Image (cartoon, rainbow, N blue to C red):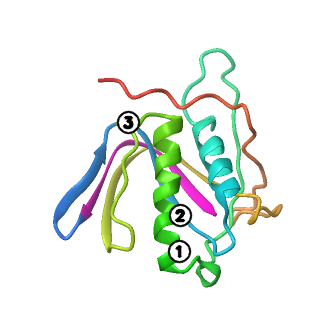
Amino acid sequence: MRAVVQRVLSASVEVEGRVVSAIGPGLLVLVGVHEADTDADADYICRKVLNMRLFPNEKTEKAWDQSGNKPDFHVAMPPAKAKPFYASLVEKFQKSYSADAVKDGIFGAMMKVSLVNDGPVTMQVDSSSLQNPAQSSNGDVGSVGDNEAQVPKETS
């Protein structure tokens, strides 16, 4: 499983001319499901995304870094299996964070995703089935560790 995480000021998903999801400041998470992914991979991605250091941490002000690889679609999970698996991942985020704050698009639909990046800050997280020490296209190598700063709860 691969998650591409972007810190945004706002984001929305449009399907067939209709906005189906929208958020204010927070994280936009794009998810690719591998054919060999399991619930353990979904748990890992959920935990890693919700614990990324992507927002200012007044206590530590510790910098972060991360490496990434290009997506590889030839090993994607077949759609019939991926759709319920994706729904399960969304549910994990809703249960682990906030059901009202976690939004999604329509699986398999051609979507227009609009966002206003904040930073820009964009991270990629791979579950254990895809983890390999790799070098990013800009030559940087790094990682996102567990126990990083928490994603702030949505404010009204």
- What is the quadrant of the C terminus in the image? top left
Q: How crowded is mark 3: few (under 14 residues within 10 Å), some or many (20 or more)?
A: some
Could you say whether the residue bearing mark 3 is in a helix, strand or loop?
A: loop
Q: Residues within 10 Å of mark 2 (few under 14, many from 20)?
A: some
Q: In the picture provided, is 94 more to the left or to the right than 122?
A: left
Q: Where is residue 6 in the image (x, y as percent from the top left)?
A: 50, 49
- What is the quadrant of the N terminus in the image? bottom right
Could you tell me if residue 126 is visible in this image? Answer: no
- Asked whether 138 or 93 is in front, the reply is 93
Per the model, the C-alpha gap separating discs 1 and 2 is: 6 Å
Q: Mark 2 points at which residue?
A: 85
Q: Which amino acid does label 2 sit on?
A: Phe
Which is the main secondary structure of the residues drawn in magenta?
strand
Give me the residue at 76% from left, 59% from top: 128
Vertical order, 54 against 44 (above or below): above
The answer to the question of whether label 1 and label 2 lie on touching residues, with beta carbons closer than 8 A, is yes
The answer to the question of whether label 3 and label 2 lie on touching residues, with beta carbons closer than 8 A, is no
Q: Where is residue 65 in the image (x, y as percent from the top left)?
A: 71, 44
Give me the residue at 77% from left, 50% from top: 142
Q: Name the residue under label 1.
A: 81
Q: What residue type is labelled 3?
A: Pro
Give me the residue at 75% from left, 56% from top: 140
- Asked whether 145 or 118 is in front, the reply is 145
Could you say whether the residue bearing mark 2 is in a helix, strand or loop?
A: helix
Q: Range of the magenta residues?
A: 1-14
Q: In the picture provided, is 151 more to the left or to the right than 69?
A: left
Q: What residue type is labelled 1?
A: Lys
Vertical order, 33 against 25 (above or below): below
First reached walking from the N terminus: tag 1 or tag 3: 3
Q: Name the residue under label 3.
A: 25
